[in-house]
Image: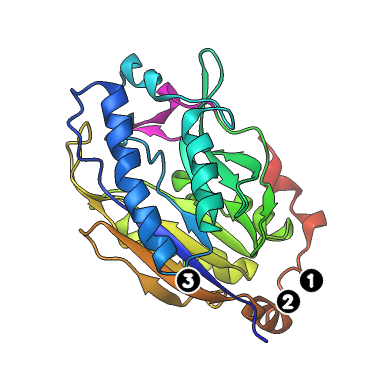
Amino acid sequence: MARIVRCALIQATCSTPTEEPLEKIKREAIEKHLKLIDEAARKGAKILCMQEIFTGPYFCAEQSPRWYGMVEKIPDGPTVHLMREMAQKHAMAMIVPIYEEDIKGVYYNTAAVVDADGKYLGKYRKHHIPHCAPGFWEKFYFKPGNLGYPVFKTQFADIGVYICYDRHFPEGARALGLNGAEIVFNPSATVAGLSEYLWKLEQPAHAVANGYFLGAINRVGHEYPWDIGEFYGQSYFCTPRGKIIAEGSRDKEEVVVADLNLDEIQEVRNVWQFFRDRRPESYGDLVKE
């Protein structure tokens, strides 16, 4: 019998005005996502991923210490605690991307991973941190990740996480494959007119090069403090052959669902022996400063 896992991605807009208190912004974002989580559960999803820093807007469009107030502890903060309850309620593993406080003044762009019984499995911290115009001032907010490229063994599949800008770097995508990922989720916040031409090139290429499934998530719509353009949605799943099998719209909040046949991984790797034919002894120059 084929090993098929139904997975879901949430793409949404943070619509609360940014001048509102941070507590209200976070509360309304979470309330919106709880409804979408319920929808994913009704559709039978067993693994769900939300978008980058889902508890608020993509605030990196400006440099303001005010947004430091969005941080939470992982796993002991309120959002991860709530999502552990939701995971257990729906028997659904979840990837929960939030703004993490390690110690006072040291913050990361992080995704917590929770299994279907509510157990906290660990976290991934975004490695590659952009700092460039227009509007990607992430080094003001995030320290580069320091936990490597872990793979989390959920009840349904072994999953890895890459976050937004990470997707431009094939090295971490390869590390996730070598570490045993069957599905890699990439929660993002990316806008039209900049990286859209790469959106359906890079990540299907990672899936092909490493023989795994990939779920790519993007926000939709216009939100402040980003006031330059619109997030273009188009969240999707692609197969180890690079085929997109489910895709969201450009401008609608929605849950994107797909059935992933994990047996396809073995089929593909039996044909394309990329891991067998690697030559790591010749790659030393890749890790030189």
Residue 273: numbered disc? 2
Task: Give residue 90's mark.
Answer: none
Could you say which quadrant of the image residue 53 lies in? Answer: top left
For the magenta stretch, what is the residue range?
A: 129-143
- Which quarter of the rendering shows the N terminus? bottom right
Quarter of the picture containing the C terminus is top right
Label 1, on which residue?
A: 276
- Verify CB contact (< 8 Å) between mark 1 and mark 3: no
Q: How far apart are labels 2 and 1 at the CA level?
A: 5 Å
Percent position of residue 238, x then y: 48, 71
Residue 190 x/y as whole percent = 33, 48
Disc 2 vs disc 1: Cβ atoms closer than 8 Å?
A: yes
Q: Is residue 133 visible?
A: no
How far apart, in angstroms, are the residues tagged by discs 1 and 3? 23 Å
Q: How is the image coloured?
A: rainbow
Closer to the chain start, of discs 1 and 3, is 3
